[in-house]
Image (cartoon, rainbow, N blue to C red):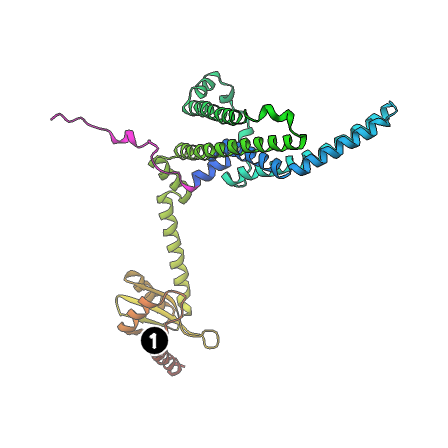
């Protein structure tokens, strides 16, 4: 069977990994988020018909009062422009009392429909001029892109189905439409309002279903568009955490500085407990300032030898106690007080050291 060599590096740049939080944050700053314009349209249409149905009595009553006022004052109008201007201004204010509450409600609902999808965000990236927007080749590619074809098909389906809903509602009402002229005005308005309201709610709910499907599609497309390759994730990790070589150098430098501080603290020690060859632990105790003796330096191997040499240089007493040295090394970090279970042993060592000092003095 013939075997063909395959270069796996060809697949290294393939974007197969989910986007990292940093990539998502960068995309959000550029205004790239998963959202559907259909959600806003569907919610606005549904809300508009619901508001008109709820506020119907208020709107009709206000319009009736406005017409009555206008007709009553037109009878006394003397034909001057000032009187006509005053009538027009009053009519304009009355119409505003009808329209403004509905428009403000729709504005709030429209904003909320977008906030629910993407949250609160501001981005000026989309406002910046880009050559690709006026490049005819790029524009031609966008026209025949997968997204453009999907939007076109979605629009055709939406128009066809909405048209079918409207046609069905009108056909169902053909029985009573010719009789409108025989009914009272109030009854005719009520029947027409109810029919239009039903049609609006049906269209709104249908568009809401389409919007939910479109949002799912837009979210999937967005996730695909921000996917990353393994190489990009590694590069991002390097940028966030720094180069591994630099990090190791920083850690080495930190260890060196910690070691220097530890050696500088040894002259203040009261005693150095040794293994005698493997461990060395420097202990300090200042009555009245410390609750218990503290380990100010510790080490094993070569570090232990350096601690003992530094202790000799500054004439710090060294006591051989293998068990205590091992216990202190394992249980106590530099700068920590010794654990309570080691109090007796350490107290015995310190008492021994203090007695030696008194004899010397």
Q: Is residue 353 left or right of residue 143?
A: left
- Where in the figure is residue 123, as x and y percent of width and height? 54, 35
Residue 4 part of the magenta segment = yes
Residue 314, given in percent of the width and then of the height, sits at 38, 69
**Which one is nearer the viewer's eye here, 60 or 354?**
60
Position of residue 6 relative to residue 319, above or below, is above
Tell which of 285 and 64 is nearer to you: 64
Label 1, on which residue?
Answer: 341
Q: Which sits in the foreground, 26 or 329?
A: 26
Residues in magenta, as a range: 1-21
x, y percentage for residue 82?
86, 26
Quadrant in which the N terminus is drawn: top left
Q: Dividing the picture into quarters, in which one does residue 186 lie?
A: top right
* Principal secondary structure, stretch drawn in magenta: loop
User: On the image, which quarter does residue 7 sit in?
Assistant: top left
Where residue 240 sits: x, y (%)?
42, 43
Residue density around tag 1, few if under 14, some if 14–19, many if 20 or more, within 10 Å: few
Q: Is residue 36 in view from this perspective?
A: no
Residue furthest to the left in view is 1
Q: Residue at x 68, y 38 (%)?
A: 58
Q: Of helix, strand and loop, which one carries label 1?
A: helix
């Amino acid at each position: 069977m013939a075997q063909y060599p395959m270069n796996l590096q060809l697949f290294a740049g393939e974007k197969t990994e989910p986007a990292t939080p940093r990539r998502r944050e960068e995309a959000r700053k550029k205004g790239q988020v998963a959202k559907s314009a259909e959600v806003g349209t569907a919610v606005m249409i549904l809300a508009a018909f619901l508001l008109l149905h709820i506020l119907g009595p208020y709107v009709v009553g206000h319009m009736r009062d406005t017409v009555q006022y206008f007709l009553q004052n037109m009878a006394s109008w003397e034909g001057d422009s000032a009187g006509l201007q005053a009538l027009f201004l009053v009519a304009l204010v009355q119409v505003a009392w009808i329209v403004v509450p509905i428009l403000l409600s729709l504005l709030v609902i429209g904003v909320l429909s977008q906030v629910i999808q993407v949250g609160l965000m501001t981005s000026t990236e989309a406002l910046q001029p880009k050559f690709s927007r006026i490049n005819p080749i790029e524009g031609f590619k966008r026209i025949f892109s997968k997204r453009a074809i999907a939007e076109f098909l979605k629009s055709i389906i939406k128009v066809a189905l909405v048209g079918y809903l409207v046609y069905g509602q009108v056909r169902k009402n053909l029985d009573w439409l010719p009789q409108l002229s025989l009914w009272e005005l109030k009854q005719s308005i009520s029947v027409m309002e109810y029919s239009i309201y039903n049609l609006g709610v049906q269209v709104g709910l249908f568009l809401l279903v389409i919007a939910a499907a479109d949002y799912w599609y837009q979210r999937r497309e967005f996730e695909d568009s921000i996917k990353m390759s393994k190489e990009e994730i590694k590069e991002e990790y390097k940028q966030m955490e720094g180069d591994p070589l630099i990090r190791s150098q920083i850690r080495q430098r930190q260890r060196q500085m910690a070691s220097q501080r530890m050696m500088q603290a040894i002259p203040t020690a009261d005693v150095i407990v040794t293994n005698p060859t493997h461990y060395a632990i420097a202990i300090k105790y200042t009555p009245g300032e410390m609750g218990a003796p503290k380990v100010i330096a510790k080490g094993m191997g070569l570090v232990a030898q350096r601690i003992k040499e530094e202790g000799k240089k500054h004439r710090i007493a060294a006591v051989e106690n293998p068990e205590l040295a091992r216990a202190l090394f394992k249980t106590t970090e530099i700068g920590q007080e010794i654990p309570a279970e080691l109090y007796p042993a350490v107290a015995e060592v310190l008492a021994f050291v203090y007695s030696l000092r008194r004899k010397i003095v």
